[in-house]
Image: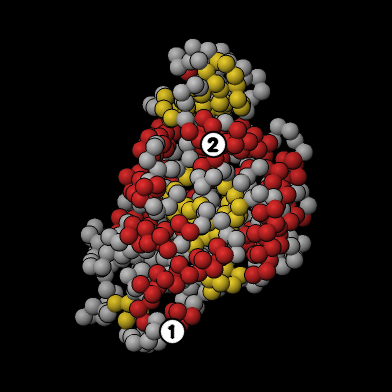
């Protein structure tokens, strides 16, 4: 089946933190191979590996030095081939991370490009002359703070970098660059890769006017989805990539698309347009930040369930029949959902299952991020122990230099939102370093690993793990989950996320109480004449709609 990704569940692996097989404290491909049986037990169909290619690791591998070799700490190209082979033996597909908005500044193309204005690689990147006073070509900012331009003495020009200065943006206007990208994609697809997650793919086409962003504050460097995404030739480039590469393989694609609306998502994912299968939206992930604040994601806004329901339901409605959703709450850039918007102590289990119910009940392809299936939590480290370049740069710009946010407030935001929350090593068991490594881990573990780990989860029939396993099985067995229509109910209710899924012959109610209150079930009753079957529930007692919904109670039921 060509649309196999429609009833698949994808498991994201952040390889440096998944499993270390050789005791150097850094996860690797052999570690992933060791854990394939675990993933088979969970029942997922696809693994997506965050980048494993050669890299100086300025942004943990999202800065690639050589697209055709595996980074030595992850292993070798042979290990990668073996991983693909062993995954395929278990009927698990392997999706790789395509990072082609930018490369590392240590990539051979950039090393040459920076040397002069007239060599073969000169136009592989985006170079601009300084303004008359020697300053940057415009006021664009980097996602990791500061200017998006870096001056290069050798060329007497600036180069553009939407991320760190070690991540220069490629010039997609250059046809040769595009061809290089298509070639490297084919290289891995010929080795058996089953598709691509495409890093910030919505940013590859730049507005060639390179004009200033509208200035609201003098001197501020701006980073916004509005300018950094959805440039004029984006869809033309993606269609070309589809024609040159994707259409030739039975593969899966998911594009990361910050700043995109459901309308843009349709352009990407309407099958008639021959672009991508689905995209990752950021809209639901941005509901807890104050829009437009200088402090960006660190400006916390209280969680409002009604806003989450509005955004996610809008994506369900707008893409229905015209595209496809990628469903996620967690990944390597997002904190743990139960710590962020739920309860990771008293109701940790119930809460993890409730969020899973809401997500896996929707139309689209669900993504599970490593550790989500055992209810891993955020961590609370002292600020100087954070590894992530995003946190380190933001601290310098906003706390040390700018003082636009106090150290205390910043710490609170980091504990809540930092990407490092998701990057602590996977918790396999209760032994030293949670069974992740026999050496010194590259990054600290959560101090809760003795309580929260895979060994404990596998030994307990009522664990979060088995709940996920059941949700994944249901995705395979119940066509309604893939095909059924979606209808939000109780849109303005503050505690409950509930919706109906319908096909010609069946109707299901999916409901989750995402609060610690007890909520009378009456509010749901008017939507069901009767309950035919409880498909899944996180409180075993749930049989119908008589009893009130307990804290973080969730279920899916077939109704009349
Ligand atoms: C998105 C990736 O998910 C993130 O981890 C990375 O820092 C940026 N793109 C830049 O590649």
Q: Quadrant of the N terminus?
A: top right
Of residues 25 and 188, the one drawn nearer to the viewer in this rendering: 188
Would you call the spot at circle 1 few (<14 residues within 10 Å), some (14-19), or many (20 or more)? some
Q: What colour scheme governs how the chains and residues are painted in the rendered image of this protein?
A: secondary structure
Q: Earlier in the sequence, mark 2 or mark 1?
A: 1
Q: Is residue 310 visible?
A: yes
Of residues 544 and 366, the one drawn nearer to the viewer in this rendering: 366
Identified at 74% across, 33% down, the residue is 461
Q: Position of residue 495 (x, y in %)?
A: 47, 27
Of residues 45 and 117, the one drawn nearer to the viewer in this rendering: 45
Residue bearing mark 1 = 112
Residue bearing mark 2 = 360
Q: Position of residue 488 (x, y in %)?
A: 41, 28
Give residue 74's quadrant in the image. Answer: bottom right
Left or right: 249 as drawn, with respect to 88: left
Question: Taking 134 as reference, is 402 above or below it?
Answer: above
Question: Taking 110 as reference, is 314 above or below it?
Answer: above
Question: Taking 301 as reference, is 486 above or below it?
Answer: above
**Secondary element at tag 1:** helix
Question: Taking 203 as reference, is 265 above or below it?
Answer: above
Q: Position of residue 307 (x, y in %)?
A: 39, 36
In space, the residues marked 2 and 1 are separated at their CA atoms by: 47 Å
């Amino acid at each position: 089946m060509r649309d196999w990704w429609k009833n698949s569940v994808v498991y994201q692996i952040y390889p440096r933190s998944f499993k270390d097989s050789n005791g150097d404290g850094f996860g690797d491909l052999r570690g992933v191979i060791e854990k394939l049986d675990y993933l088979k037990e969970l029942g997922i169909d696809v693994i997506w590996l965050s980048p494993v290619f050669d890299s100086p690791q300025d942004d943990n591998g999202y800065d690639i030095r050589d697209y055709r070799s595996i980074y030595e700490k992850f292993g070798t190209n042979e290990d990668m081939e073996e991983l693909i082979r062993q995954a395929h033996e278990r009927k698990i597909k392997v999706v790789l991370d395509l990072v082609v908005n930018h490369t590392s500044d240590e990539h051979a193309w950039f090393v040459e490009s920076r040397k002069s204005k007239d060599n073969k690689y000169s136009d592989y990147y985006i170079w601009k002359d300084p303004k008359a006073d020697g300053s940057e070509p415009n006021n664009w900012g980097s996602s990791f703070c500061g200017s998006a331009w870096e001056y290069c003495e050798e060329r007497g020009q600036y180069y553009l970098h939407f991320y760190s200065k070690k991540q220069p943006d490629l010039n997609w206007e250059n046809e040769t660059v595009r061809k290089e990208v298509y070639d490297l994609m084919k290289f891995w697809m010929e080795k058996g890769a089953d598709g691509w997650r495409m890093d910030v793919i919505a940013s590859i086409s730049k507005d060639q006017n390179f004009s200033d962003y509208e200035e609201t504050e003098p001197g501020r460097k701006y980073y916004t989805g509005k300018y950094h995404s959805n440039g004029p030739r984006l869809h033309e480039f993606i269609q070309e990539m589809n024609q040159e590469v994707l259409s030739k393989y039975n593969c899966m694609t998911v594009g990361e698309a910050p700043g995109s609306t459901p309308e843009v998502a349709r352009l990407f994912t309407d099958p008639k347009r021959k672009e991508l299968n689905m995209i990752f939206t950021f809209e639901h992930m941005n509901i807890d930040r104050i829009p437009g604040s200088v402090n960006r994601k660190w400006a916390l806004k209280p969680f409002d369930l009604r806003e989450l329901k509005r955004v996610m339901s809008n994506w369900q409605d707008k893409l229905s029949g015209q595209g496809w959703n990628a469903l996620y709450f967690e990944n390597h850039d997002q904190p743990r959902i139960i710590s962020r918007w739920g309860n990771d102590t008293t109701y940790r289990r119930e809460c993890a299952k409730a969020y899973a119910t809401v997500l896996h009940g929707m139309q689209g392809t669900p993504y599970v991020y490593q550790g989500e299936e055992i209810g891993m939590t955020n961590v609370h480290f002292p600020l100087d122990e954070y590894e992530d370049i995003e946190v380190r740069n933001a601290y310098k710009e906003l706390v040390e230099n700018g003082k636009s946010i106090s150290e205390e407030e910043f710490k609170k935001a980091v504990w809540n939102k930092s990407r490092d929350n998701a990057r602590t090593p996977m918790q396999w068991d209760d032994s030293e370093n949670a069974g992740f490594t026999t050496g010194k881990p590259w990054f600290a573990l959560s101090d809760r690993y003795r309580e929260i780990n895979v060994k404990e989860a596998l030994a307990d029939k009522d664990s979060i793990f088995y709940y996920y396993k059941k949700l994944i099985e249901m995705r395979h067995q119940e066509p309604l989950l893939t095909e059924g229509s979606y209808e939000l109910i109780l849109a303005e209710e503050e505690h409950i996320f509930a919706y109906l899924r319908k096909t010609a012959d069946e109707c299901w109610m999916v409901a989750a109480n995402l609060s610690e209150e007890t909520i009378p079930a009456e509010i749901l009753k008017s939507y069901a004449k009767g309950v035919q079957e409880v498909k899944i529930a996180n409180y075993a007692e749930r049989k119908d709609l008589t009893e009130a919904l307990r804290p973080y109670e969730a279920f899916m039921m077939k109704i009349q």
